[in-house]
Amino acid sequence: MHVGIIGGASTIGSTLAYSLVCDDPRHSVMLFEEALDAAWGHATDLTHASYHLADPPLSETDEIGEVRYAPTDEIGDFDLDAIVITARVPPSDDDTQRGARGARARELDANLPLIDDIADALDALEPVPTVVVTNPVDRIVYRLWNRLGWPRSTVLGFSLAETARVADAIARRRDVHPTRVSCPTMGEHGERVVPVFSRATVDGTPASFTRAERREIVDEILEVPFEIAEKRGIGDSSRWVSAAGLLRVLRGVSASTPTDPLCLSVPLDGEYGFTDAALSVPVTLADGGIDRTIEWDLDVSEADRLREAYDAVRADVRRFDQ
Ligand SMILES: NC(=O)c1ccc[n+]([C@@H]2O[C@H](COP(=O)([O-])OP(=O)(O)OC[C@H]3O[C@@H](n4cnc5c(N)ncnc54)[C@H](O)[C@@H]3O)[C@@H](O)[C@H]2O)c1
Ligand SMILES: O=C(O)C[C@H](O)C(=O)O
């Protein structure tokens, strides 16, 4: 796989690059950056890392991948199988709330012009699966897709960290390992996240939750990424869960058979009764991007919460589309 990471020197981008190098020495990674010195540093260090990871070589015919870097406006010169966007305008030092809950929404106005510039650069390429990490994810996915005019199946937003956080929150309450829990998470990547408790299972058996438990879990997953950043340092966002989840998505968009459903943010065209916005909904992935969008039956409170998420994203889309 040849992956381009726009914002390749970012916390998330550089961690993803390392995950790709560890995953398979045949992957090539291009770091597209504005901060070219930092990109050089990561590309050089990762090339040194690949020395250890590619030894012994896989076979005579396998080509070992490379890690290189370039300015974003040169992306059209490269042949890429998938793109991940992690670039952002750094939050201002005056923003005292930049590491607090609600920080994602506050990135919108600064990141819109950046994403428009990225869309202009991507115009030089044929459509390839493109995964947005930049916040606020749902608004940015919609804006990018709208600007690019690429097929809906190729533009998606990363929101899988929530699925892992919900699993962990449930696992601690049921005293099991998180990998034994499944609770897909739809809606907004932010305050209006919608854990689908009606589909939750523990050890494959349906699990039920009181209203108070549901509220506590939602509150916990909204707080935890900011608690992590506060304890680890403001610039150190949730790099490990994001890189691991992104690797899963990248494997999905290059898979020869469709994946199981995963909740990712996609532009909607009538699914769940919604249009002209993006939200996390269940999709299967296959070579080239989204294979299928799935409409699950939701209980009343989940459907109401999903509607609230849509209304909030749609209100912002209407504002910036004027
Ligand atoms: N979706 C999620 O689950 C999730 C998880 C974590 C972080 N995020 C979001 O991801 C984004 C990145 O977070 P981070 O902490 O990794 O960022 P960061 O602040 O560490 O890095 C941002 C990078 O973007 C680069 N950049 C700016 N303009 C660019 C351009 N035109 N081309 C290429 N690169 C450019 C900067 O030089 C910098 O290296 C943020 O918006 C953050 O809120 C989302
Ligand atoms: O870094 C952030 O703003 C939080 C991020 O969206 C996350 O879910 O980890």
Image: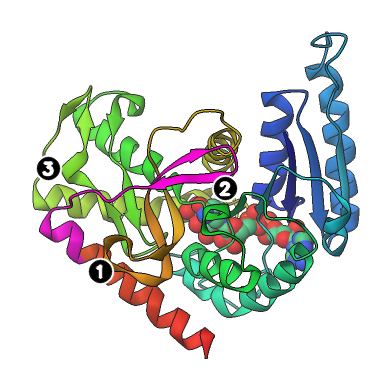
The residue beneath circle 3 is: 209
Q: What residue type is labelled 2?
A: Arg
Q: What residue type is labelled 3?
A: Phe
Q: Which amino acid does label 1 sit on?
A: Arg
Q: Where is residue 223 in the image (x, y as percent from the top left)?
A: 38, 56
Residue in the foreground of this view, choosing between 159 and 141: 141
- Callouts 2 and 3 close, C-beta under 8 Å: no
Comes first in the chain, label 2 or label 3:
3
Badge 1 crowding class, 10 Å Cα cut-off, few under 14, some 14 to 19, many 20 or more, is some
The residue beneath circle 1 is: 307
Residue at 19% x, 61% y is 303
Q: Is residue 304 above or below residue 215?
A: below
Label 2 SS: helix
Question: Alpha carbon of mark 2 to alpha carbon of mark 3: how far?
Answer: 32 Å
Residue in the foreground of this view, choosing between 239 and 229: 239
Q: Position of residue 217 (x, y in %)?
A: 25, 48
Residue at 68% x, 55% y is 127
Q: Where is residue 6 in the image (x, y as percent from the top left)?
A: 73, 55
Q: In this view, does 173 lie above or below 109?
A: above
